[in-house]
């Protein structure tokens, strides 16, 4: 696969886990073991401020910034519970039977995960960042926060002695600065002085148009201890894809969370936008976040999708069966906005089905050709606008339900799977209703999360319905 390969230093830091545990605390690019090491790490770098961040339901970083002296002095960090009840536009939906506000809007506490401590390389003053977990005021778990939703799904596997392994692939567009949202987006000019056009899939020349920006993405990533496996140009104009190395789902969700921020900041430095909208430009391919998934035995490290003789296991097929049955009902966690469903349309290079097949990119669930030890399932439905914690939680939970219920998959699809009917929800409200109507999800996601998430999504839909689109003005203004 053609890719933009950077010097070894850009990838030499290894996985996040290695960076956090194998290196001495003062030289570690990412993560320390305890507060004593954190104080020494911050002092060695002359860090003045620390950003304590956590993802909200949309995956947007929320939190507080403080001087380093306060961060290391056991300062209590709190955010209001309403943070997890507002829409992407900042509105607060009306209450329903299942969507309720906390009566006192009481505090939630931020607990820094010191294994995620790293510098913020784009800041002019020495600044660090740390991802935080969220707990109640007495330390109890808050089940509806995205990081906790994923951790709860991970515990389901851990209780069976298993460990999921994932590898996300994230697509995004570079677009010219757009100050007026009424105007369509268009590609930026590259180093040639011309706007890049489509048809540049896997083109090295397409990547080279943005060499300096990509250099900054690599440099920013290296300084944070984040590792990019490969980077390619996708089919859309100035559409790129970053592939991450496989690893622990929570750590990989953290990486995607930070990569999105990193890529946006690098783009702004060069006077352009980076967008993870699922469908930013009409007539162009959408942006996906494909998720490769396997499950290993926690003690032996062996892939439970393969038998001893290398053949696929029944667990492998049941995992696929669970995804076929339950992913359509959890699609709103993989495609969370009205815009997401503009990507999920026929003939636009993404699946609109729940079929599976061997090395078949037209299916929702593709099994790449691999050795038995690397046998995995690629979920091709998630869009790049998805909250990575929730997308991983949904995908892994559906596979887990398939294993537990021993759900048999259909026969694999060997032809084009995108011809015929669409086997997925066609819009946001339909997807929300399917999430609420699936009783098996209460055990894996929690009733409180489902109620809050569904309420926020309905609120976003109502906000969207207040906007009159160009299509309506063009075809309805003088014709109806």
Image (spheres, rainbow, N blue to C red):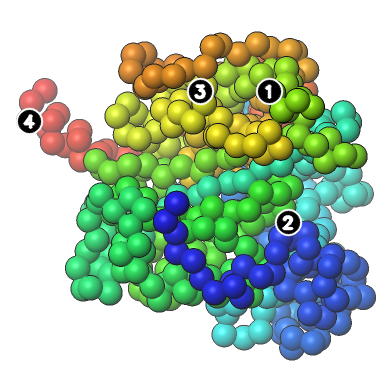
Q: From this view, report whether residue 337 is shown above or below residue 217.
A: above
Of labels 2 and 1, earlier in sequence is 2
Between the C-alphas of marks 4 and 1, the distance is 60 Å
The image quarter containing residue 325 is top right
How packed mark 4 is, by other alpha carbons closer than 10 Å (few <14, some 14-19, many 20 or more), is few
The image quarter containing residue 397 is top right
* Residue on which the image places disc 2: 79
Residues tagged 2 and 1 counted as in contact (Cβ below 8 A): no
Residues tagged 1 and 3 counted as in contact (Cβ below 8 A): no
Between the C-alphas of marks 1 and 3, the distance is 13 Å
* Residue on which the image places disc 3: 357
Q: Could you tell me which secondary element the residue under label 2 belongs to?
A: strand
Question: Which percent across, then down, holds residue 375?
Answer: 65, 34
Of labels 1 and 3, earlier in sequence is 1
* Residue on which the image places disc 4: 478
Of labels 4 and 3, earlier in sequence is 3
Q: Nearer the viewer, residue 438 or 291?
A: 291
Of labels 2 and 3, earlier in sequence is 2
Between the C-alphas of marks 2 and 3, the distance is 45 Å
How packed mark 3 is, by other alpha carbons closer than 10 Å (few <14, some 14-19, many 20 or more), is many
């Amino acid at each position: 696969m053609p890719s933009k390969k950077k010097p070894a230093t850009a990838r030499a830091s290894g996985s996040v886990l290695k960076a956090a545990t194998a290196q001495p605390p003062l030289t570690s690019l990412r993560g320390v073991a305890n507060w004593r090491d954190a104080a020494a790490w911050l002092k060695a770098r002359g860090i003045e401020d620390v950003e304590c961040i956590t993802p909200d339901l949309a995956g947007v970083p929320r939190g507080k910034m403080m001087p380093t002296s306060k961060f290391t002095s056991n300062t209590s960090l709190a955010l209001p519970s309403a943070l997890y009840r507002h829409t992407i536009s900042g509105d607060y939906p009306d209450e329903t039977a299942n969507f309720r506000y906390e009566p006192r809007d009481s505090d939630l506490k931020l607990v820094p995960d010191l294994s995620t401590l790293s510098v913020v390389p784009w800041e002019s003053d020495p600044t660090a960042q740390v991802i935080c977990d969220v707990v109640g005021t007495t330390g109890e778990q808050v089940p509806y926060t995205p990081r906790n939703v994923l951790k709860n799904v991970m515990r389901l596997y851990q209780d069976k002695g298993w460990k999921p392994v994932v590898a996300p692939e994230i697509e995004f567009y570079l677009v010219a600065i757009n100050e007026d949202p009424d105007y369509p987006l268009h590609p930026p000019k590259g180093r040639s002085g011309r706007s890049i056009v489509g048809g540049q899939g896997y083109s090295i020349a397409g990547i080279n148009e943005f060499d300096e920006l990509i250099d900054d993405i690599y440099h920013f990533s290296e300084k944070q201890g984040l590792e990019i496996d490969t980077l390619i140009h996708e089919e859309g104009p100035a559409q790129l894809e970053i592939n991450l190395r496989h690893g622990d789902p929570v750590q990989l969700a953290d990486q995607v969370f930070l990569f999105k921020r990193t890529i946006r900041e690098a783009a702004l430095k060069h006077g352009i936008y980076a967008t993870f909208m699922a469908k930013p430009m009409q007539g162009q391919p959408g942006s996906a976040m494909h998720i490769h998934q396997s499950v290993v035995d926690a003690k032996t490290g062996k892939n439970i999708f393969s038998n001893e003789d290398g053949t696929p296991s029944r667990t492998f097929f049941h995992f696929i069966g669970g995804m076929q049955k339950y992913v359509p009902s959890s699609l709103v966690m993989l495609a969370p906005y009205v815009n997401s469903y503009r990507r999920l349309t026929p003939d636009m290079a993404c699946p609109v089905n729940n079929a599976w097949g061997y090395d078949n990119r037209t299916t929702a669930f593709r099994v790449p050709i691999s050795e038995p030890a690397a046998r995995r399932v690629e979920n091709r439905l998630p869009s790049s606008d998805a909250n990575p914690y929730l997308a991983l939680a949904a995908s892994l939970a559906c596979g887990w339900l398939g294993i537990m219920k021993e759900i048999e998959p259909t026969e694999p699809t060997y032809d084009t799977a995108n011809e015929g009917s669409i086997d997925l929800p066609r819009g946001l409200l339909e997807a929300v209703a399917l999430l609420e109507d699936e009783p098996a999800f209460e055990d894996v996601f929690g009733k409180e999360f489902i109620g809050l998430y569904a309420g926020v999504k309905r609120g976003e839909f109502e906000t969207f319905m207040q906007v009159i689109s160009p299509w309506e003005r063009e075809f309805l203004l003088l014709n109806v």
